[in-house]
Image (tube, rainbow, N blue to C red):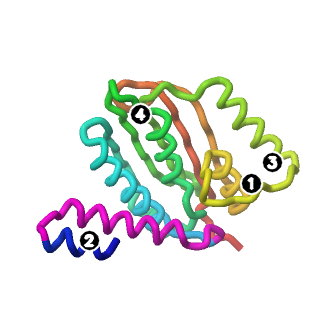
């Protein structure tokens, strides 16, 4: 990847060079031990690298809007809890006949950090919501914790890692609701956790 980036720079192809750098940073981030936590700043940078690459790929067919409280940068949180949600939105909500709009809003309130991600897609089916709810309920009732890997980084996986990291001091909500973005509707996913230092 570094060789491709150097070649692109030598040939004045700044976009390809930038893509290589972002992809290299993403690969470095996801190959770290997933059990290690990270800072909000690094997690957000990983997410921005992903959305920058997706924007290059789909052009005007997709847009991302970030509204982030900069005071959150040094907060510690589990690795890979934001970008996989955005990737899910791209994977399941994008259609060729409309512009996919995704908003990422991050803030702190009453001792918790929150990240809300919305899109203007078709939303969750009743079956999908029930399946997710059932898996979460089974885990909360004491079922065996599944192996948590990077592959298949789904919403239930994110719920499990938030719970393992924060115990009961976290927030996780999925819903279909009219959004605050153009072409209202689609999915709204909010996650969060206690901002206090873990002991």
Labels in figure, total: 4
Q: Residue 56: horizontal and vertical position, in percent?
A: 27, 49
At x 76% / y 41%, what residue is drawn? 135
What residue is at 50 percent from the left and 69 percent from the top? 39
The quadrant the C terminus occupies is bottom right
1 and 2 marks in contact (CB < 8 Å): no
Of label 3 and label 4, which has the lower sequence position?
4
Q: Nearer the viewer, mark 1 or mark 2?
A: 2
Tell me the CA gap for discs 4 and 1: 34 Å
Instruction: Say left or right for 46 vs 160.
Output: left
Q: Which residues are magenta?
A: 11-35
Residue 132: image location, x then y, percent: 70, 37
Query: Which dot marks residue 168?
Result: 1
Instruction: Please say if 47 is above or below 74.
Output: above
Q: Residues within 10 Å of mark 4 (few under 14, many from 20)?
A: many
Residue corresponding to mark 4 = 94
The CA span between labels 1 and 3 is 13 Å
- Disc nearer the start of the sequence (2/4): 2
């Amino acid at each position: 990847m570094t060789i491709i980036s150097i070649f692109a720079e030598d040939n004045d192809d700044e976009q390809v060079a930038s893509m290589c750098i972002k992809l290299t940073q993403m690969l470095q981030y996801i190959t770290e031990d997933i059990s290690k936590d990270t800072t909000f700043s690094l997690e957000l940078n990983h997410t921005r690298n992903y959305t920058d690459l997706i924007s290059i790929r789909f052009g005007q067919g997709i847009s991302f809007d970030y509204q982030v409280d900069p005071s959150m940068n040094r907060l510690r949180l589990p690795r890979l809890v934001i970008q996989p949600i955005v990737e899910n939105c791209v994977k399941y909500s994008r259609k060729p006949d409309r512009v996919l709009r995704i908003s990422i809003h991050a803030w702190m309130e009453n001792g918790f950090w929150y990240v809300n991600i919305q899109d203007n897609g078709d939303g969750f089916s009743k079956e999908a919501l029930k399946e997710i709810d059932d898996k979460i309920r089974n885990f909360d009732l004491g079922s065996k914790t599944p192996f948590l890997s990077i592959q298949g980084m789904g919403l239930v996986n994110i719920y499990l890692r938030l719970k393992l990291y924060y115990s009961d001091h976290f927030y996780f909500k999925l819903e279909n609701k009219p959004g605050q973005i153009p072409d209202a509707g689609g999915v709204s996913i909010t996650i969060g956790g206690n901002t206090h230092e873990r002991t």
